[in-house]
Image (cartoon, grey):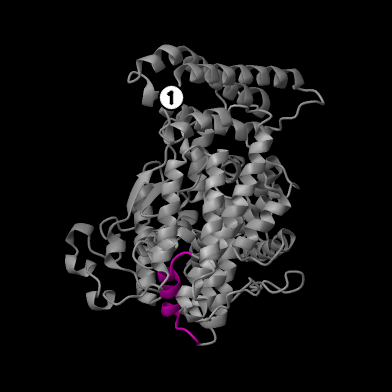
Amino acid sequence: MRNVTSIIDVVDFRHGQPTQAKRDASAYVPDLVALSQPTSSELRELVERFSSDREALLRFYDVPGSQLQLNRLKEFYKAWDAKLADVPYESLSVGARIDWQLLKGKLKYLLVLIDRDEKRNAEMSIVLPALDGIAHLQETRRQFEPVKSMQVAATLAEIEQKLVATRRELTAGLGGSENVATKSLALRAAIRIAELKKVLDDWFKFYDGYDPEFSWWNRTPYAKLVAALDEHEKFLREKIVGVSLGEDEPIIGDPIGAGGLAADLEYEMIPYTPDELITIAEKELAWCMAEWKKVAQDMGLGDDWRAALERTMSDHLAPGEQPYIIAWQAYEAIDYMIKSDLLTVPPLAIDVWRMTMMTPEAQKTNPFFLGGEQLRVSFPTDSMSHGEKTSSLLANNIHLARATVHHELIPGHHLQGFCRDRYNPHRKFFNTPFWIEGWALWWEFRLWDLGFPQTPENRGGMLFWRTHRSARIIFSLNFHIGKWTPQECIDFLVDQVGHSRHTATGEVRRSFNGNYPPLYQAAYMLGAIQVRALYAELVLTGKLKEKDFHDRIIRGNMMPIEMVRANLSETELPRDYKSSWKFAGDPMWVTSGHMS
């Protein structure tokens, strides 16, 4: 354990940058002449119109997953798809063709998601009979139809009775061969109940107290239905999912299967099967392990990569001092970017990022820190158990943090967010983790090649994350195709990456019980490999200068990396374009092709 003053100059930790309040404000103003020239494609307004209209429909049809919501959205998407065909494609610019392809792909994928939601609703109906009834109440109100108070009271009572009957049937089947509710299905239904209670509350408050007849008929059946929903949610979580009072929720997840992965991969323009992607990840993991052995040798530890990781992780700061080393590391990375002329770093982006501390509860799913304009720092608090404190100290050590700061801030997520709001902002609608996380991890690749890690421990910090990203592909895809359980994923992170049991559990919990789409965990490494292949294709061949390459990626805004390739190479995509870029070659025989 070290004190921050033994590592950095706490007086001049900004590497020559002025304090935020002392920078000349004129540095924040861009070249307005250049800015006055249009840079977005001619389809920008079309994309913005679709996005805004869709959001308006979602605000109106606000019952999550209701059949009416799904029907109206399906009709809307099909109507847009039909009219998109009328756009004179052959006269479009390179950028507009990209926007057309992005919107066409988005419409197709949104229809896939509706089909997926309908199938999941059908599965949920056996454990949650309340969805249609509650949805109808709210959606009738949205149509401004007069409320029939006596009939509504009967509806509320009927839904309550259905819940009681369903719970009785499920209880009878617990532990037997007739139990039809899986843990993942029960968890999905419990989450939906929490959403339905908000909808029901909004509906009830619209009338209650304003319509005397409504209140007279409905206050009692409404209260009983809310109690029944509470009891049903509790039953699903405790009796089927297995949540125990006072304990963390078990990691269940909801795998989408091989078919679901295939649809998601098609949307993200990844022309590989899950098995091929796992093979690619295994080769990346093998490269990492070979580098780990070199680090161990440089530390005088032979080939013992675990000992090298332990030494790396044991180099951490005392409680309370983490924010100061992170600030120093952030400015260190910014200074390196600017002096190496790797990309444009606006002074305003340097000055407006902020820092906050992660709560102990949040650290259960985010054991490491997260970023963007606001960096959320994980570090021990006085309320943690002794084991949690030591695990957090080790996980957020100096060298893992050094490799994470630039990923989360500059040139990573904070700079991405800064540019997303200022360049081609209409493409924020085409949000993809392959662009978001792939870009941030690409910088870990690039800085490694440039010699940014100065010590064996620095290299160990970067290698931990690179090993972890490889492992994420392997465990997340194996989970979603039904080969691995969450526990097997945790064990894999412990055995193959060197995670503690605590951080491995947090990572898997975050992957499967959070709000991340199925391919999110795989997108880090795969997106970075795509950018690496694109760098070799355009920069190493002299077609683009490195700074231009990076500036054009981040200013092009979000899209699958295959579309980034079309944008940077100024390819006029045909109307019937299909994804075909084998960015990793044939994974069954081509080596990983790391640059040195």
Q: Nearer the viewer, residue 264 or 476?
A: 264
Q: Nearer the viewer, residue 379 or 217?
A: 217
- Horizontal and vertical percent position of residue 413: 43, 59
**To which quarter of the image does residue 131 belong?**
top right
- Residue at point 64% right, 60% down? 265
198 to 72, vertically: above or below:
above
- Residue at point 24% right, 75% down? 31
Quarter containing the C terminus: bottom right
Of all residues shown, which one is farthest toward the bottom?
542
Looking at the image, residue 415 sits to the left or right of residue 543; the answer is: left
Q: Callout 1: helix, strand or loop?
A: loop
- Residue at point 63% right, 20% down? 162
Which residues, given as a range, are shown in magenta? 543-558
- Horizontal and vertical percent position of residue 479: 69, 47
Looking at the image, residue 380 sits to the left or right of residue 481; the answer is: left
Q: Nearer the viewer, residue 123 or 559?
A: 123
Q: Residue 547: within the magenta?
A: yes
Q: State whether the magenta stretch is mostly helix, strand or loop.
A: helix
Looking at the image, residue 176 sits to the left or right of residue 462; the answer is: right
Give the labeled residue for mark 1. Answer: 147
Q: Is residue 445 visible?
A: no
